[in-house]
Structure formats: structure tokens, C-alpha cells
């Protein structure tokens, strides 16, 4: 199989108008780029254009440090918003965790398997339990115990730690603290949570207990960007699995772990590959 | 393949205690019955025992008209509640429908295919549109237009029609009127609705529009027994299907139709085969 | 919601090279078209480029009867193969059927529901059973009984009937005759079959019986373009459903009907919307 | 929630006849047992009766070491075959592994999470790579390099090691050696393999490559008891996931890992909880 070269990826969004696809693809072509993936979505009702274009850097005539600047000229003509990424510049990532290890362990094993191209720079927890896991994977571990009294102070310390390390994506891997709106606002569309229900069903605490009480026949998990409204951010991925009357709450929790792991991992992978664009409270997934 | 003889089915529920399975199976065995299916569920937390036993009538020594009376003696010793059904005595069924034909047509085609063993006695609608479909299938059609003014009177007329025909199961096949609590109370665990969402998400009107607004990645359908609380009755069956940002509300409605048809048909089939037991606000499905 | 205007759709395939997306989108843009959907796939291993572009005809400066000719100039420069379709020129379709009605009825009900934009011109059967269904839907019905002796002659007559009516898509809706290679060759990538198994498992006759014997835990259905090798053509869509040891062969057949209906309908819809491109023995689905 | 006491589980199979359920449940009841789960399946075509009954040992009047002997009297009257298990006597398990770690790691993490009640006594590999994983989990690791020349000798050594440790279940967690018929014959219905395809599709080597070549739209995984015919043993569990033309063979391998992990873990869990009965080449799953 042909070796993949490094690639550049543009995410573009703006009001819909004629010539957008042509302008983007022409920019790539004129400068000697070979498009590997081009995908586009027009939300006719909202009048929005959203696109993702990925091309090989090999043979591209613009040096990578000037691509953004050069594309800005194109973007200005159409009022495009855009982001530019390079496949050999992986995102810096921090994982927040509490006591449940399964999502953390799952992400770390997928990293080992080469599924998640990212710089796993930091693990943050309000409990000391997972320090050993972090160390076994050679990742820095910071313990910030949270109480009602120290919460604001600790969040400030966490934020400082994230900034210092240049963290670009925060993954809440069953982190059981609710982060303050100010903290959340620092990571717009850059903080991914896993909620252990099929949202919007069973918002809030103990969704498996809620599901058990309601007698549903399927349970789910939802990964979403965190916003200041609890469990209400743009949904990236969801999955469900079948349960029956034989399943106790403990069975739901057990079956749910598999959902949580997979749904969170898929969302993180999509984000890391720059395949998610958010508009309004919804996501476009370029897969 | 061996020809199936007619069968008797017992549904039994009571507080859990020692000897229940033995007592039921002994009753069948002592009287010469051959058990085809025996399934049982103990809800340990609730201390409830629920069971379903089906046996061949051929060779059974108690004449069928006396089986209920004879089993009552066993039941009394344990405080069992029970229901008794015979496979050659299909339930009498009425379908309520409005303007959308897909669930109605689907049920009628499944009847033709031999999937639903019931006496399809009546189709009721608040619109005249489906009279032709009813007639093509040789089923009586009654049109009861509903207005805020005539609603109570029309419900009384509907109820009289159902009673007169001895209807034992009412299927709401996308019937768009909310039935009054008094009407609902006439058919406890005998009225099945299809709601076009994954309950408890998107209760009430226009669930596909709600799903579109929320940006979910899966849509669902739920069949449940109707209670006096809207979309809150015991759930019999649920199913979901994947959607994407490319799907408009119209696409959701289209994809949802397939879910609605299948989920309603499965629930009706389970009910007609006496495979559903309700306790609290939940169902046990003996499949 | 904004009214959809009529659209043109280009399907393009050729060896991969620089500038393909730019050339196609530039063609649309320069001539005043607004792209609604643009999707592209590069098979890096095979060095193949495949794309689908759909744009609004309203405001497009080239009259529709000349679009193909004008695009041919672009295509020549790159060695592109292409097909051009207009949304207001639905394909002419014939359904072949035998004794099982469910796929036929399902397609006809979806047509009524507006899910399948096509000219349902003809129903062909080797049995007379479904004449009434055809007539109820106002579709011409031709009965060609097939025996080993008359098969070649009848196929010739069928082919003449299809040609005469300008049929562009043949749908085998559980048609139980194997068509001759010569017949198949007349409809390359224009004849869709539904096979009642998860291909390549259980090729040939009685796949549900085969599945029952093997003790699988899921059964499936597969829609594919027909080639001269039995059940071996490019797969368009597949789906599975769970079964258990409790399911008899009859249960498998019943559960399978739902799969067959959905999988065939999805494939036909994808084809009719020009969302399928075939290369090698595989399909690209632009959904 | 009520604390679960230890339980006894009977698996019973024999030709179908009147009185089987009554005899088993009467045995439990007469001796003071409380049945928690009773499930039964009659294969009418094959004339086979298969059942699983689980009851609380607390208050049961027969000492556990004599339950088998006492039930034998009941079994003899009906020609029943049976097996008896106790929930506080977990099975002894060995995992065979090669170079791919994901199934091994998954099983070990599920053990940590309390999902798999077993005595993980041994990890065997034809490569040294996973010694560290074994040690991190405190499990003995034996390395048996296999060559065509030493294969028979090494298998004999493996078998001796398994016997010495009283291994009752062998789990092939992506073990890449084919075991000899003689070795397989030592573990009838006690050796579980995970095959990375939806069997019977893509038997043998490189099923993901086969799936890619065939252009299927779903890939699967299958866990089954190992028999002397390759990939042909009784199937315990299967699952599939959707793929598209965008997925390379590497993507199939990545997506397949999730399937393999879940399908193998489910099968092992079912076996360890004595929920699987095999007859002919099929399984009955009492879940």
C-alpha cells in the first residue's frame, strides 16, 4: 500500500453562497496539492456551508507556515471562517478522571494501539487512585482534591496547569465534578464529556438508575462538547445496547461501560482527526 | 417438522416464595401436559415472581373450560395472580388510526403474512381516509370525527363500539388524539401505543423535530401500554436507527417510519402471544 | 424551509490525479451553479478517484440539454468517466417478483409515501399471483411463466418488454428464477437483487435453513448489483438482526422479511438518487 | 438491595418427555431451595429438552457435596444428562495469546472490574511479548515457542501444564496457532476462540482482508467453542459493526478489535456463569 504523506486539513464554515467548493479546491490545486478527502455539508434551512478538505503536503508549493496566511485571502472574499491543521502536529490532550478507571484505561490502550494520534500530556484527577495507571503509561499525573470550599482555587490551579502545558483538548473520562462555567468557557468545543445515557434522556445524576426505574429496553451513552448547560452541549456520538428485565442496575452499569468506552473513544478520535465542526448546538461529522 | 398442537399459556405473578415453579410445573405434569416453554423471572429487589408456562393441550386431562378453575386451587395456596390463554382463541383487536397509514398498513400486511394471530375486528379513525384500506382487508371501519366539543360523546360511542365487539386489545397506530383517562382506564395493559421517539427522550408533540433540534445521532421509537400519563406507560419494545447531520426533519420522519412499524408490530405480536407481563411501570418480556 | 429546486448530479470516476475536485467544482461555479452536495472518495491503494456533485439547476447558465456536452470538455482533460442525471427525470423501473409479496408490497408502499422517486413502469412475474397488487397500484403486470424448456424464449420476451418501455433499473424483489448471463449483461449495475443472507455467508438456496443449521446468532440480508456470478455482485447495503436458539426456521424467515424489505428499499433509494458508484466488485455509497 | 447468597446451578439435557420441568423444580423445592432463575428450551424438531435452574444454597437441606448424588436419582428416572456448578467455586481459566494484546488486556481489565468470576490461573503464549502484562496482573506466564518441528512436543508440554493446574476453560485470545485435534479433544466445549469475522463468512486467514476485497458493508466477530474443524464449532456469540468504502483494511482491523473484545468477553462470561449448553453443533444461551 502506498505510504501516506503528511497532510493539511482545512475546516471551513460560513453562510452558503456560490463558489465556495470551487474556491477551496482551486486554492489547493493551484498550489500543487492533491486532495485526499473533500467533504461538504450545506444546511439549506440555516443557510450554512461547512466543509473539510484534506490534502497531501508533499509537493504542495506553499510552505506550511504560510498556508494559513495565504488561504486567508481566499477566505476573506467569501467571509469564510476556517481552521488549519497538520497531521504531523498532534493535539495536546489532558484527561480528567475520578474513581472509575475504564474510560481512562481504554483511551490509554487505544493510544498504545496507535488509534489516537495525540500528545497525551496530562492526567488530572480529584482522587489519587489513578496515579499508578498514569505512571505506567509515562503520563504526568496531577491530583487536585475538590471540596466546595477549595473548588474555585483548585480550578484556577488546574487551568494554570493546562495553559502551561498548552493543552488543546480536555477529555472528561467519567470525571465526576461539574466544572464551573468560567472553566468551561476556556475550552469552547475543546472539552469532550461522556454521559452515561442516551441524551437527552436521563440528564444528570445516576442515569442507569433512572433507566432501570423507567424500564427502558435500550441504554445508551453520549459524547458531547461541554457547554455551560449540564449535559446539553453539541452531541458528537451516541450508541445504545439492548437490555432486558433480567438486567439489574449493576448489569446496566456493566453493559454501559462498554458503551461509554466506545462512544468516548470515537468522539476523541473524530476530534483529533479534525472531523467535527460545530454550529448552533449541533455537530457535523465528516467521516 | 412436528405439527404444533394447540396450547394453553399461564401468566403468573405474585410475591416471591419457595415452591412456585414446582407448583406450576407439577400442576401441568400431574394432569398429563407437556411443557413447551417455561420461563420465569424473579425481581429480587422487588420480591416479585413472574412466570409464563405454555403446554400442549393434546393429551391434557383437564377439559379446557375447567383448567382455570382447577389451577385456582394451586394459585390460592401461594397467593398467585394468573391469566390463562388458549392458542386457538385469538384476541379481538381494534386499530385506532388517523391520517398516517404506514403503521396500519404494516399491521395488516403482517396479518396477511400470518405473523399476527388475532381477530382484526375493527378499525377506528377520526378521519375517513383509511376506509378504503380497511375495506380492502375486509375489516369494519368506523369514523368518529373528534372536536373539542364532541370528544366526550365520541369517546363514549367508541367505547360502546369496542364493548359491543368484545375488543380485548386496542392498538394506537399513530392515532393523533389523546384519549381521556376514563377511556384509557377501560383497557389496562390492553392498549398499545407507538411513540415516535426513544422514550423518555422527546415526550409529546413532534419528537422528530425535537430530535433534529437537539442534534442527536440516533432516533428511536417506543411501543408502550397506554396509561393516563402521556407517553409514560410500561415500555414493551424500543429500537433506534442512526442519523447524521445530512438528514433533514423529513429524512428523520422517513427513517422513523421503519422504526415505528417494526417496534409496534413486535409489541403487538408479543402481547398477542401472551409474552408480556406488567408490574410497577415495567414489563417482563418472555421471549 | 427553503423549497428545493431541481438539481443536476454528476457521478465521476477516473484514475486519481491533482485538480479533479477543482475542475469539477469550477465547472459548476463558473456556470453559475450552487453546489448542494459534493462528496468524493479516493481509493489510494487502487489509485481511483470517485465523486458525486449535485447542484441546483435554477440559475445555472448552461441549458440542461447541453450540460453533458459541455462537461465532456472538462472530463476529456482528465480522462474522467461520468454520468449526468436530473432530479426531475426519474428513472424507469421494473420489478421482478415471484410468489413472496413482501418486498414488492414494501416498495409500492414506499412509492406511495414518496420515498422512491421513480417511474414504476412494470411488474414482471413468473407467477400470476401478484397481478392484483400491480393493478391496485396502477402498474402494468406481465406474466412470463418459466420452464426449463421455455426459459430462453421467455427471457427474450422479457428483455423486449423492458427495452420497449425504456427500463433503466430492474429490481429483483425475491424473484426466484436465476437470470441468464446474457440477460444480466444487458443491465450492468442496473439490476438490484435482494439476497436473504449476510453475504458472502450462505450463498445460494435456502439461506435461512443454512443459518439455522449453522447456529448463527445473527441473520442478515444483502442487496447487490447482479452479475453473472450468483450472489457475487457489488454489495450496496447489508443489515442483520439478532436471533436466538428459540427461533425456528419459520421465525428466521419472518424476521428476515423485515431485513429484506429494508435492505432492498435502501439500495433502490440510493440507486435512484444516484448515490452509488461501482468499481472493481465494490460500491462507493455517497450518502 | 438484598444480598445474593451463593447458588447452585444445574444444566440438564435429554430427550424431551413429560414431567422434566416438574421433576427438576420439585427436587429443588422439596429440599428447601428457592429458585432464582429457571429457563428451559425444547427443540421440538430435534426432540431435545435443555434447561438451566439456579437456586439459593442458603437454607437448602442437602449438603452441597451430596447434591449431585441426590439429583442423580431424579436424572436416572428420565435419562437426563446434567452438570452441577456452585457460584462460589469459580472455574479455572487459562488464556492463550500471541502478539496482539487487545483481547488479553480486555479480559484482564474485566476481571479487575469484577465482570468475570474466574480463577485466572495461567497465560500461555507462543511469544514472550505479554509476559509483562501477565506479571502486572499477577498471573503466571508460560512461553512455549512453536515451530513446525517442536509443535507436537510443545503441545504436550502445554497440556501437562494445563492439567497440572486443573484448567477447566481455555480462552484463545487471538492465539495465532492452530491447535492439533488431539489437544482440542481434551477440552470439549471448554475451549473458546474468537474469530475476527462473521462466521461462516471469511473462514481462515486474514478475514478483514477478505472482507475488504468482497466489499461488505458490515464486519463481524464470532466466539465459538473450538472443535477439530477450523472455525466450525458451536457459535456462542456474534456481533457486527458498520463499515464504509472509506475504511481501509487498517480501519477494518481497528474497528474489528472492538468487536473481538466484546464478543469474546461476552462468550467467556456466559460460559463462566454456566449459561451455555451445546447440542449438535449449536448452543443454547440461557440469558
Image (cartoon, coloured by chain):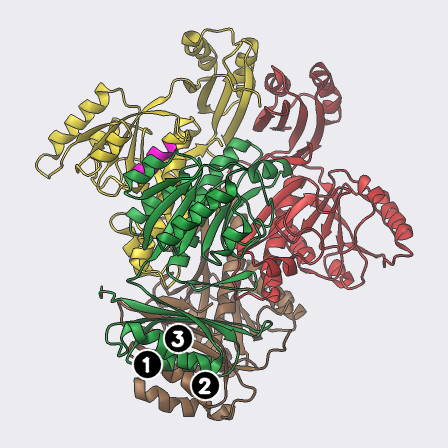
Chain colours: A yellow, B brown, C red, D green
Q: Position of residue A107 (x, y in %)?
A: 34, 35
Q: Which residue is mark 2?
A: B28
D155 on left or right of D55? right
Q: Residue at x 45, y 90 (%)?
A: B30
A91 on left or right of C153? left
Q: Position of residue B251 (x, y in %)?
A: 53, 44
Q: Which residue is mark 1?
A: D29
Residue B9 shows up from this direction:
no
Q: CA distance from mark 3 to mark 2?
A: 14 Å
Looking at the image, is mark 1 or mark 3 nearer the viewer? 1
Q: In front: C116, or D82? A: D82
Chain at tag 3: B
Q: CA distance from mark 1 to mark 3?
A: 16 Å
Magenta span covers which residues? A104-111
In primary-sequence order, the first of circles 3 and 2 is 2
Q: Which mark is residue B51?
A: 3
Q: In front: A239, or A185? A: A239
Kindly state the secondary structure of the residue where label 1 is placed: helix
Magenta stretch: dominant secondary structure: helix
Kindly state the secondary structure of the residue where label 3 is placed: strand
Quick check: D56 above or below C192?
A: below
Quadrant of residue D258 within the rendered picture: top left
Q: Quadrant of the N terminus of chain B?
A: bottom right
Packing grade of label 2 (10 A; few <14, some 14-19, many >=20) is many
Amino acid at each position: 500500500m502506498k505510504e501516506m504523506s503528511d497532510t493539511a486539513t482545512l475546516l471551513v464554515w460560513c453562510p452558503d453562497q456560490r463558489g465556495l467548493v470551487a474556491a477551496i479546491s482551486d486554492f489547493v490545486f493551484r498550489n500543487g496539492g492533491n486532495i485526499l478527502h473533500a467533504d461538504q455539508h450545506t444546511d439549506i434551512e440555516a443557510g450554512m456551508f461547512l466543509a473539510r478538505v484534506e490534502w497531501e503536503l508533499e509537493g504542495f508549493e506553499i510552505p506550511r507556515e504560510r498556508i494559513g496566511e495565504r488561504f486567508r485571502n481566499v477566505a476573506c472574499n467569501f467571509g469564510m471562517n476556517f481552521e488549519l491543521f497538520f497531521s504531523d502536529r498532534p493535539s495536546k490532550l489532558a484527561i480528567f478522571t475520578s474513581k472509575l478507571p475504564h474510560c481512562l484505561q481504554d483511551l490509554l490502550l487505544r493510544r498504545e494501539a496507535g488509534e489516537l494520534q495525540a500528545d497525551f500530556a496530562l492526567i488530572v484527577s480529584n482522587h489519587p487512585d489513578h496515579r499508578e495507571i498514569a505512571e505506567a503509561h509515562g503520563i504526568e499525573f496531577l491530583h487536585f482534591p475538590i471540596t466546595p470550599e477549595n473548588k474555585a482555587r483548585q480550578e484556577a490551579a488546574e487551568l494554570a496547569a493546562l495553559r502551561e502545558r498548552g493543552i488543546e483538548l480536555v477529555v472528561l473520562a467519567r470525571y465526576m465534578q461539574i466544572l464551573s462555567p468560567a472553566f468551561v468557557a476556556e475550552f469552547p468545543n475543546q472539552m469532550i464529556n461522556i454521559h452515561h445515557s442516551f441524551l437527552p434522556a436521563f440528564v444528570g445524576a445516576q442515569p442507569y438508575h433512572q433507566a432501570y426505574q423507567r424500564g427502558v429496553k435500550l441504554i445508551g451513552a453520549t459524547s458531547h462538547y461541554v457547554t455551560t448547560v449540564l449535559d446539553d452541549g453539541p452531541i458528537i456520538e451516541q450508541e445504545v445496547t439492548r437490555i432486558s428485565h433480567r438486567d439489574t442496575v449493576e448489569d446496566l452499569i456493566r453493559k454501559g461501560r462498554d458503551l461509554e468506552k466506545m462512544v468516548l473513544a470515537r468522539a476523541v478520535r473524530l476530534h483529533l482527526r479534525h472531523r467535527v465542526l460545530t454550529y448552533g448546538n449541533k455537530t457535523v461529522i465528516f467521516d
